[in-house]
Every structure is written in structure tokens, then in C-alpha cells.
Image: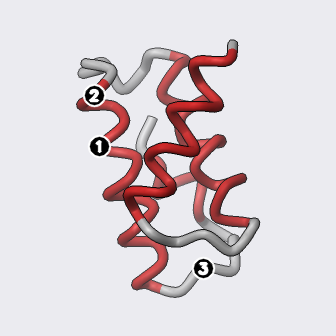
Amino acid sequence: MPIRGMLEGQAFNPEQVGELVAAFESVLADLRFVDRTDPVTELVARAIIECAKTGEFDRVKLHDCAIEAVTKH
């Protein structure tokens, strides 16, 4: 599942979306997920979006936030 589809209707500007997408791709690469239909990819996307809703838009911090959220489950 691409993260861009989940960002529709969200109040993020294009630069912020770019950071979210970069973080998403980075997390999937670190977790070695290539199958975008795997349900974990949606979990990663949701975690990144939730982190961004707190005002964080740095791709490295979003990456770390998502990794922490995903590995707790």
C-alpha cells in the first residue's frame, strides 16, 4: 500500500508529504518489505502519519518514530 493514498485529504503541504514518503520508503527498506500489499506496510504508513500529526516532519525522526511504533506490536 503506498502511503500517498492515505495522505489524501490530510493537511500536509507538498514538502511535508515528501518527507513522509521518504520516511515510509526508508522504514520499508530497513524492514526489508518489498510486498506493498503486506498489511504491515499500512501499519508503517499509519505510524508515520500519526507521528507527523504531532508536528514532526523530519524524515529521520519520522523513520525512528515509525520503527518504534511498529516494533512495539
Q: Mark 1 points at which residue?
A: 26
Q: Mark 2 points at which residue?
A: 30
Q: Distance between the residues labelled 3 and 1?
A: 19 Å
Q: On screen, 19 above or below 68?
A: below
Q: Name the residue under label 3.
A: 12
Q: What element carries label 1?
A: helix
Q: On screen, 40 above or below 16?
A: above
The quarter of the picture where residue 15 lies is: bottom left
Q: On screen, 14 above or below 50?
A: below
Image check: 21 left or right of 53? left
What amino acid type should be assigned to the residue bearing mark 1?
Ser
Image check: 37 left or right of 7? left
Image check: 44 left or right of 19? right
Q: Distance between the residues labelled 1 and 2?
A: 6 Å
Q: Position of residue 22 (x, y in %)?
A: 32, 57
Q: Where is residue 8 in the image (x, y as percent from the top left)?
A: 61, 66
Identified at 38% across, 57% down, the residue is 60
Q: Distance between the residues labelled 3 and 2?
A: 25 Å
Q: Which of 31 and 1 is in front in this view?
A: 31
Q: Which of marks 3 and 2 is in front?
A: 2
